[in-house]
C-alpha cells in the first residue's frame, strides 16, 4: 500500500499542493500536519509509521517534509530498508531506496538538504548581526509600563491572592504580572 506524508511548518501555510500531489501519485492514505520540522514529536508521522508493513511505500512531496537533518532522514530510510518498506520523494525525483543507486541518490540529496538548512541558518545569523551592528534590536518590543497596575499588582500579590485572580482582576497576563513584580522589587 502507498502511504503519503505531508507537512508544512506553520498553521498559515496550506497542505493542498502536497496532498494533491501525493494522491495523484497513488497514495491510499495521506497523513498531514502543520508543525515545524524542528518539532521532536510529529504525531501524524508517528501514526503513519506505526501502520507501515513490509512491501508498503512511503511517498513525500519533498525530503525536507519528512525530516530536517540528514541524520534523521538516513535513520528513517535505514529503518524502512530493514522493514522492507520503499520510499519515494516526488520533488527530488522518483527513486526506490531498495536499490543501491536509490540509496546513493538519497544520501547525496539528504546531505544537500542539510547544507541548505545550515546555509539559511547562517544567513539569518549574519543578517541579525549586521542589524545589531546598525543599532537595531530584534525581538518583541517592550510593553508600556502602567505604574497604577504595577502598584495594584504588588498590593494584591502581598495579600497572597492566587495569581489567576490577580491577573483577571487587573486584566493582565501572567508574564506582565511577574514583570511588574520584578520591576517593583518584589521577591517571588
Image (cartoon, helix red, strand yellow):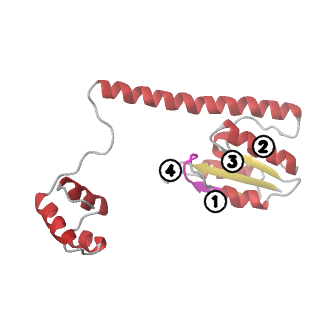
**Which of the two discs, 3 and 1, labels the residue nearer the N terminus?**
3
| 130 to the left or right of 187 | right
Marks 2/1: CA–CA distance: 18 Å
Magenta highlight on residue 80: no
Task: Name the secondary structure under disc 2.
Answer: helix
Q: Which mark is residue 21?
A: 3
Q: Choose the circle earlier in sequence order: 2 or 4.
A: 4
Q: Identify the residue position indicated by label 4 in the image.
A: 10
Identify the mark nearer the N-term, 4 or 1.
4
Count neighbours of disc 2 (C-alpha within 10 A) and say few if under 14, some if 14 to 19, many if 20 or more.
many
The residues colored magenta run 32-38
Q: Position of residue 82 (x, y in %)?
A: 86, 47
* Residue beneath the point at 17% across and 56% down: 184
- The mark found on residue 43 in the picture is 1
Q: Residue at x 69, y 38 (%)?
A: 71
- The answer to whether marks 3 and 1 mark residues whose Cβ atoms lie closer than 8 Å is no
Q: Nearer the viewer, mark 2 or mark 4?
A: 2
First of labels 2, 3 by sequence position: 3
| Residue of label 2 | 77
Looking at the picture, how far across and down is residue 127, in whole percent?
40, 27
Label 1 crowd (10 A; few <14 / some 14-19 / many >=20): few
How much space separates mark 4 and mark 1, taking CA atoms? 15 Å
Disc 2 to disc 4, C-alpha distance = 25 Å
User: Taking 111 as reference, is 97 left or right?
Assistant: right
Q: Is residue 88 visible?
A: yes
Tell me which corner region of the image, top left, top right, bottom left or bottom right, holds residue 124.
top left
Would you identify the image quadrant in which residue 28 lies?
A: bottom right
Above/below status of 187 relative to 164? above
Q: CA distance from mark 3 to mark 4?
A: 20 Å
Q: Secondary structure at mark 3?
A: helix
Amino acid at each position: 500500500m502507498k502511504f503519503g506524508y505531508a507537512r508544512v511548518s506553520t498553521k498559515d501555510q496550506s497542505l493542498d499542493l502536497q496532498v494533491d500531489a501525493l494522491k495523484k501519485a497513488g497514495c491510499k492514505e495521506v497523513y498531514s500536519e502543520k508543525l515545524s520540522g524542528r518539532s521532536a514529536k510529529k504525531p501524524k508521522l508517528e501514526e503513519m509509521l506505526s501502520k507501515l508493513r513490509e512491501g508498503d511505500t512511503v511517498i513525500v512531496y519533498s525530503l525536507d517534509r519528512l525530516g530536517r537533518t540528514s541524520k534523521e532522514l538516513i535513520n528513517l530510510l535505514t529503518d524502512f530498508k530493514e522493514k522492507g518498506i520503499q520510499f519515494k520523494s516526488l520533488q527530488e525525483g522518483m527513486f526506490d531506496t531498495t536499490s543501491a543507486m536509490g540509496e546513493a541518490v538519497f544520501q547525496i540529496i539528504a546531505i544537500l538538504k542539510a547544507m541548505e538548512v545550515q546555509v539559511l541558518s547562517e544567513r539569518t545569523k549574519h543578517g541579525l548581526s549586521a542589524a545589531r551592528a546598525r543599532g537595531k534590536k530584534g525581538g518583541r518590543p517592550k510593553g508600556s509600563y502602567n505604574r497604577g497596575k504595577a502598584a495594584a499588582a504588588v498590593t494584591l500579590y502581598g495579600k497572597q491572592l492566587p495569581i489567576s485572580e490577580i491577573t483577571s482582576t487587573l486584566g493582565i497576563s501572567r508574564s506582565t504580572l511577574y514583570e511588574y513584580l520584578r520591576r517593583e522589587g518584589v521577591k517571588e
